[in-house]
Amino acid sequence: MSTHKQLTIGLFGFGVVGEGIYRVLNQTPSLYASIKKVCIKHPDKKRDAPAALFTTNYDELLNDEEINLIVELIDDADEAYKIVTTAFRKGKSVISANKKMIAEHLQELIQLQQEHNVSFLYEAAVCGSIPVVRNLEEYFDNDLLQSISGIVNGSTNFILTQVADGASYSEALLEAQQKGFAESNPSLDVEGFDATNKLTILLAHAYGILTEPASLLRQGITRLHAKDAAYASEKGLKIKLVAQARKLSSGKVAAFVLPQFVKADSQLFNVNNEYNGVIIESKLADKQFFYGKGAGRYPTSSAVTSDISAFGYHYQYEYKKLNRKEKNALTNDFYLDVFVSFAAWTDVNKWDFEELTEYHSTADRQYIRGIIHAEKLRDASWFNDPSVSIIVQQDGVIEKESLVHKNLKKVSLQLAGVGF
Amino acid sequence: MSTHKQLTIGLFGFGVVGEGIYRVLNQTPSLYASIKKVCIKHPDKKRDAPAALFTTNYDELLNDEEINLIVELIDDADEAYKIVTTAFRKGKSVISANKKMIAEHLQELIQLQQEHNVSFLYEAAVCGSIPVVRNLEEYFDNDLLQSISGIVNGSTNFILTQVADGASYSEALLEAQQKGFAESNPSLDVEGFDATNKLTILLAHAYGILTEPASLLRQGITRLHAKDAAYASEKGLKIKLVAQARKLSSGKVAAFVLPQFVKADSQLFNVNNEYNGVIIESKLADKQFFYGKGAGRYPTSSAVTSDISAFGYHYQYEYKKLNRKEKNALTNDFYLDVFVSFAAWTDVNKWDFEELTEYHSTADRQYIRGIIHAEKLRDASWFNDPSVSIIVQQDGVIEKESLVHKNLKKVSLQLAGVGF
Ligand SMILES: NC(=O)c1ccc[n+]([C@@H]2O[C@H](COP(=O)([O-])OP(=O)(O)OC[C@H]3O[C@@H](n4cnc5c(N)ncnc54)[C@H](OP(=O)(O)O)[C@@H]3O)[C@@H](O)[C@H]2O)c1
Ligand SMILES: NC(=O)c1ccc[n+]([C@@H]2O[C@H](COP(=O)([O-])OP(=O)(O)OC[C@H]3O[C@@H](n4cnc5c(N)ncnc54)[C@H](OP(=O)(O)O)[C@@H]3O)[C@@H](O)[C@H]2O)c1
């Protein structure tokens, strides 16, 4: 049995999560951890903790020899990057929940952490309370991962759930913010950036792939139309923002964040409100599903607490898959089965599709469903058109090989009398 | 980064799981693990592996200095106990999937393992591929666990799913056996012994409670009646065999394995066939759900592989909760909201119940629902009557305090004209 380190923590941030961790640590003596100093931004804010605990001076934490663990919970990614890299250079280990900062600098942070022989843990950065990073790292390290498919952003999932239940988008967003699920800058959530950041982190631990979040195919939920929601509910489907990675038969990995139709038989169907859920498909274990709260003070604190405890037992990520000889790599050479809805036929170019399989028209909204190459989709003029909404079908990743053999019923739109 | 041990494995058993692990290791060079010798029982069985690999002599493995890990996958708990304890005494670490052996000797095995400073891992013993032991041990180690509630036996869950879909009980059992989900002795599965063994192991890692499996309140699925299944499906419920532990407001823990009605809003509702699922409710993280295959060659091999890998990285369970100052303890001082069905009124004594809340009678089957003290239930003459079936309601654990305040509508059975 290894012994537990005594931890003296320097905490950055005293917001939703930071104050949560402060309260939890005060109630959890078994962690052998105490907070020596808290660095915040606004010294004049009223806080429910002794004034002597607080400072606005980074160095009071980073230069304190007694502090052996930095817990970084601020909402500013650029400042967080400075704090974390400085901490590493000073030989201090770090726990962070800042997925934006981590995703954007992962390669460098891993290197720096190894150079300085410190620990860097960030379970709270992906899916809040669900131990998905650690399980990918530790548990699936020798199983061939076929796919990961997850609802990883609590705030958008809360909004989508409320909207499906009849709320307006803006009401739902406001409520997500009031409940502490939303990022300070809500476009990180609703434009899918946050989910993309999390997917970037998952790719590292699942496949040993390091990538820029900005290079991943991404759509948020802002362009979803009320008619899309109506269409989904008519068909017994739910619309979810899904982050997905799938190993193709070429050996390369397809990865994207897109709204997706989810069927009732999928475990993701019952992931509602701020809950997150991740389906991991592997060769040996087949389908596994992890579900829990993805945001909020205490669920997020729970993940940070687990990291603190693991650090106390000398745990660090091994990045096992990064160090393998056979490297995995991303590709955009695959097809997607997508549903596209839009106001006027001129909005979408049907020639971008390999196959059109469905077509539907109402007074004020048109829909098509078709198979499109991922790069064609990303580069299509209408991909960024705010009046066009794009939703992937469940299991909508299609490989070149299966496309050729698939006998898709082409809907003759001309015959349907549409000048499309 | 710690270095990976080179592992030389002595494997006991070459059945469903043992042969699975042999195949997986041959395909997974990243594990740095090779099998030097396999001990089996019947030397004359035809095997799909080189004959020189096999022996029936335990000592060839246990006395081999080069072998530094014993992987024990036989179906005989008593022999497994001998093998594992001998291995410990010889300073060898062990991975096992033998829940019966582990549950029945856990306290001693933990002591022995610590004395001899070896590792003992058994993720495959609970819920097959789902990493529930390791997550309880590592991830929830400082969160207050309110309850664990799981479908932990793949074989009974397969049977219950098939029966709900119209199969007969015996057909379904046969199919479970053919598919390799069932224990060699099926009464371990269908009488709930296997689930009780798993609950025993979960109690150690969740609450630091060591108990005898035989002391837990238990019913299997053999007494469920075709009419119970019909009643459940009419009400939109499913019957599942659920292993449950719940922390009561007294601070003590209620634990049992009983058939349970599961509602569509529970994550357990969609756990079908050989899949397992565990809901963990904790103070910080709230509800988490882990889902995956609970039995079968490769799902089980997946868990064994993860243990082999973890052992390669020097992992051992810390049994953190066992070493806490504040000990948890079991209690039977709680009430259960149960549904009881039976052939004739004389089978069940209504005076055993605190409250009767429902009553229903058909030509050949009677049902009552009521609140009963756990000890009254266990000691009732009809608890062991093969013609009486007992099913707990979802969230059916009721504390003394809430019982007093609960305004239960007593159904006057006398008025209903029944001489009960
Ligand atoms: N909320 C969630 O559910 C959740 C879930 C997962 C991950 N996260 C991540 O956790 C982190 C914190 O989120 P949050 O929701 O707790 O944010 P928050 O409630 O907005 O709190 C941010 C805190 O950071 C402090 N801060 C900002 N800039 C700073 C600077 N330059 N130096 C020192 N302190 C600074 C703020 O100080 P003042 O108090 O002085 O303004 C505030 O205390 C973020 O990275 C977020 O992405 C949050
Ligand atoms: N099957 C599953 O899905 C599953 C899931 C979780 C855990 N488990 C556990 O895994 C273990 C193995 O299960 P299994 O399904 O693989 O069993 P199995 O298919 O019945 O195979 C049992 C193996 O053990 C060998 N064996 C029995 N007694 C032995 C002895 N005294 N010395 C040496 N070898 C002996 C048998 O040898 P012969 O081949 O010579 O007969 C056979 O190879 C059990 O503890 C079980 O509870 C199984």
Image: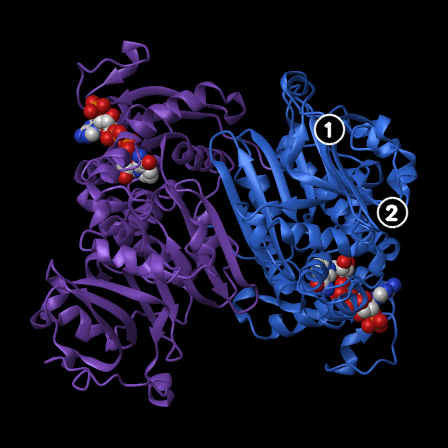
Chain colours: A blue, B purple
Q: Position of residue B91 (x, y in %)?
A: 33, 36
Badge 2 amino acid:
Ala
Mark 1: give few (<14), some (14-19) or many (20+) Cα within 10 Å. some
Q: Above or below — where is B216 with respect to B275? A: below
Task: For ligand 1, tell me if the residue under mark 1 lies within 8 Å.
Answer: no
Dividing the image into four quarters, tell me where ligand 1 lies: bottom right
Q: Is residue B304 left or right of residue A147?
A: left
* Element at label 2: loop
Residue A94 in view, yes or no: no
Q: Chain of mark 2?
A: A
Residue B351: quarter of image: bottom left
| Residue toward you, A280 or A174 | A174
What residue lies at 29% left-to-right and 44% top-to-bottom?
B166
Q: Quick one: label 1 or label 2, which is nearer the N terminus?
A: 2
What residue lies at 62% left-to-right and 39% top-to-bottom?
A148
Q: Position of residue B46 (x, y in %)?
A: 23, 13
Residue B75: quarter of image: top left
Q: Above or below — where is A236 with respect to B46? A: below
Which quadrant does the C terminus of chain B fall into? bottom left
